[in-house]
Image (tube, rainbow, N blue to C red):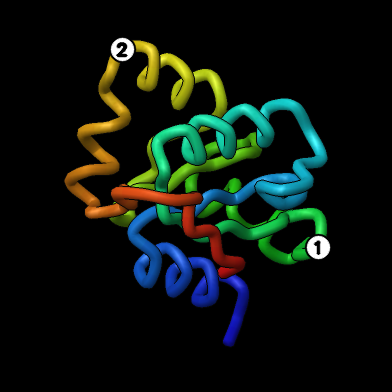
Amino acid sequence: MDTLEKIKQQISKNPVILYMKGSPLMPNCGFSARVSHILNRHHTAYAYVDILENPDIRATLPGFANWPTFPQLYIQGELVGGCDIVAEMDENQELLPMLLQADAIIEEGEPSIIEA
């Protein structure tokens, strides 16, 4: 499977997916840490891809998304944006309804995080 098909499959298979530097437990940049913290605070079930360990995805995704930077958050197949946009949407209480609509909120316990 080529990289573009792999990305499309990851996005379609996971209601919420975060392309980030590092992992939610060990982010490798402050922007990735902030977005994963926001998702974790909402007890979001989400997948992630460490672009540092997947240079093919790191090189291909910006062209596919028409978004040059990381992290990139997708909800129900649509690019939401990067750190500033996600943080602003969270502050404006626009993010949680999207996560609820994607049925990605866990009622109790720790967030469910999987590597895509």
Which element is circle 2 on? loop
| Residue at 35% over, 68% down | 12
Horizontal arrangement in the rendering, residue 53 relative to residue 98 (left or right):
right
Q: Which residue is mark 1?
A: 53
Q: As drawn, which residue projects farthest toward the bottom? A: 1
Pick the front one: 87 or 6: 87
The earlier-in-sequence mark between 2 and 1 is 1
Pick the front one: 102 or 2: 102
Which amino acid, by three-letter code, is at mark 1?
Answer: Glu
| Residue at 28% over, 18% down | 93
| Residue at 62% over, 27% down | 34
Pick the front one: 12 or 30: 30
Which element is circle 1 on? loop
Asked if labels 1 and 2 touch by Cβ distance under 8 angstroms, the answer is: no
Q: Which residue is mark 2?
A: 92
99 lies above or below 31: below
65 lies above or below 68: below
Which amino acid, by three-letter code, is at mark 2?
Answer: Asn
96 lies above or below 102: above
Give the quadrant of the N terminus: bottom right
Which mark is nearer the camera, 2 or 1? 2
